[in-house]
Image (spheres, rainbow, N blue to C red):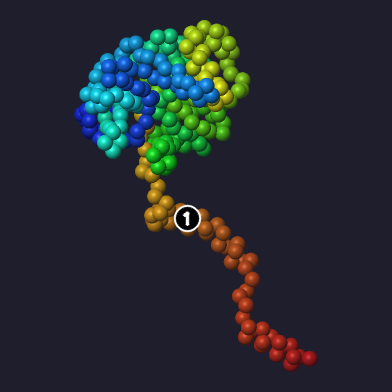
Amino acid sequence: MTQERILKRGDGWDEHYRGTKYHCKPNGEFWWELPDRQNMATVRVAATAGFREVSEAYLSLRPEGGSLRITETGAVLTRMPSGWEPVYVADYNVPLEFSSLDVLGTGVLPLGLWPSFYDGARYSYKNGRLWWKNSVDGVWQQTRETLPADIEARFRQVKPEGGSIRVTENGKVLALIAPQPLPRGMKDQYEALTDLQKRLIEVKMRNVALLPVFLGDYSGGFTLHEAIDLSAPLTPGEEADLMAFLSQYGGAMEDNAPAPFDPLAEIEDALDREETR
C-alpha cells in the first residue's frame, strides 16, 4: 500500500482512483468484461476462485452490487452511490483465477503476446515522464516514481513516440503496440492460446488495431505530484525559471532594436542640414 495511514473498510480513498475494473452481483458473482463495440456485445469472463474475500468485503459496502477497481498496489476500491466518492474496500491478497485464462501470464517473456485481460491502472509515458489523467476533470498529474530502466527501454523500443501503459494488480506492465518486428516465437505462442485468450486478442485487434504485449514486472506503486493550477500566480521558482529563459532574448533584442522616434531630434537635424547648405 502506498498510503501511510492504515485504512479501514469504507474509509475515503485519498490517492488517485485507478486499477483493473471488475464487477460483482449481489449474489457474489464476480467477473471482468470487455466491450466489443463493433458487434455491440460484451465478452464476460467469470472468476472461478480467489474472489470470495474481495466480493464479501465489497458487498458489505454495496449490497446492490456494481463495479470495483483493484490497484497495482493491491487496494480494492469502489465509488459509493451517495456522491460517488471513492472508498477503500479491502486488500487484494490472492490472485484471481479464471477458466482458460492466467492473469499472471506464466511463462510469457518480455515483449511477448499478453494472453490475459488488457486492463489495470492506466498511466501515460511521454518524454521520459510518466503521467496519470484524472477521468473526472481531465487534469494530468506527473508521477513521483518512474518505470524501471529495463521496462522503460522496452517501452521506448515498441512505442518510441510514447503512449499509455497498464499496470495490473499482479504487477504486470502491459502496452498496446502497432504492427512491428517482435521477437520470434509469437506465432507459436498464439497457437498455444485457448479460444478465450484468442478472442480477447481478436476483439482488441478489431477495436483499436493494436496488439497487447508484456513489458515486465513492477512491484511498486505510483504516487502523484500535485496538479498544476494554471490560474494561480507563478511561484518564485517558476518566476525565476521564466526570467532566466527570457534573458536569452533580451540582449539580442536590445542590441538590434531601432532607436525610439524623437520628433524634436528630427526637427533639429533638419535645421542643421539647412544651415549647412
Question: In percent of the image, x 37 and y 31: which residue is there?
Answer: 18
| SS at circle 1 | helix
Q: Residue furthest top?
A: 192
Vertical arrangement, residue 222 with respect to residue 214, above or below: below
Q: Which residue is mark 1?
A: 242
Vertical placement of residue 97 versus 231, above or below? above
The answer to which quarter of the image holds residue 183 is top right
Seen at 39% across and 50% down, the residue is 229
Relative image position of residue 126 (x, y in whole percent): 50, 36
Q: The residue under label 1 is which amino acid type? A: Leu
Across and down, in percent, residue 7 comes to 22, 30
- In which image quadrant can residue 191 be found? top right
- Marks counted in the figure total 1
Let me know if residue 109 appears in the view: no
User: Where does residue 105 sit, x and y in percent of width and height?
Assistant: 44, 14
Look at the image and tell me in which quarter the C terminus lies. Answer: bottom right
Residue 234, image x and y in percent? 40, 55
Q: What residue occupies the far front of the structure in this picture?
A: 40
Given residues 166 and 243, the one toward you in this image is: 166
Residue 115 vertical position relative to residue 66 in the rendered view, above or below: above
Q: Is residue 256 visible?
A: yes
Q: What quarter of the picture does the N terminus occupy?
A: top left
* Residue ID at (32%, 21%): 24
Which residue is nearer to you in this view: 249 or 55? 55
Instruction: Tell me: 159 left or right of 268.
Output: left
Tell me what residue is drawn at x 41 percent, y 25 percent. 120
